[in-house]
Image (spheres, grey):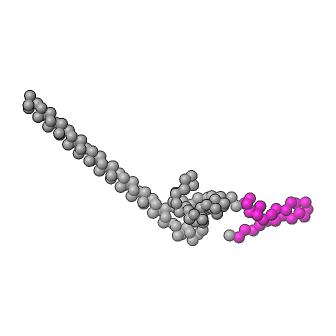
């Protein structure tokens, strides 16, 4: 990424502005693609804007994110769709498991009710 730096000269009484100071003033955030869920930042596959130091010191070295270049956007394009499909599948499995547990509980309840009914009938027949 090549930046055109504007350096002001001290000619005509204008102060000199260094290139690094100019760069810090104009580059606020960098777009990255997250490779893991990050609390308060985003989910896997999201394109988020974060500070350059956070990317340079934390995200990129630990493999939590990659820079959102055109090549990386193409490479990780299907990542978000994959995550959504995975979440939907997990939700469906969870719902099926809940239904199965509910059916088992109903069967247990029916068995217990039948046993109580049988025991009451036995007591009534003895009396």
> Residue 59: where, in percent of width, then height?
59, 61
Is residue 68 visible in the rendered image? The answer is: no
Taking the magenta stretch, the answer to whether it contains residue 96 is: no
Quadrant (top left, top right, bottom left, bottom right) of the N terminus: bottom right
Q: Nearer the viewer, residue 118 or 32?
A: 118
Quadrant (top left, top right, bottom left, bottom right) of the C terminus: top left
* Drawn side of residue 126 relative to residue 67, left or right: left
Q: Residue furthest right?
A: 12
* Drawn side of residue 99 relative to residue 47, left or right: left
Q: Tell me what residue is drawn at x 61 percent, y 60 percent.
A: 58
* Drawn side of residue 37 relative to residue 31, left or right: left
> Residue 62: where, in percent of width, then height?
57, 63
Q: Tell me what residue is drawn at x 35 percent, y 51 percent.
A: 95
Q: Which residues are magenta?
A: 2-26
Residue 26 falls in image quadrant: bottom right
Q: Nearer the viewer, residue 85 or 59?
A: 59
Residue 120 falls in image quadrant: top left
* Drawn side of residue 122 relative to residue 34, left or right: left
Vertical side of 24 occupied by 102: above or below = above
Q: Tell me what residue is drawn at x 23 percent, y 45 percent.
A: 107
Q: Nearer the viewer, residue 88 or 52?
A: 52
Q: Nearer the viewer, residue 84 or 101?
A: 101
Q: Residue furthest left?
A: 126
> Residue 111: where, in percent of width, then height?
20, 43
């Amino acid at each position: 990424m090549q930046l055109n730096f504007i350096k002001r000269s001290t000619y005509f009484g204008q102060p000199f502005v260094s290139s690094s100071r100019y760069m810090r003033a104009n580059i606020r955030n960098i777009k990255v693609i997250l490779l893991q869920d990050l609390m308060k930042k985003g989910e896997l596959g999201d394109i988020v804007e974060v500070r350059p130091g956070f990317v340079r010191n934390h995200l990129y070295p630990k493999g939590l994110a990659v820079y959102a270049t055109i090549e990386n956007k193409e490479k990780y394009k299907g990542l978000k769709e994959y995550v959504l499909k995975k979440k939907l599948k997990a939700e469906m499995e969870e719902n099926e498991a809940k239904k199965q547990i509910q059916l088992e509980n109903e069967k247990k309840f029916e068995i217990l009710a039948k046993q109580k009914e049988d025991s009451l009938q036995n007591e009534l027949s003895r009396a």
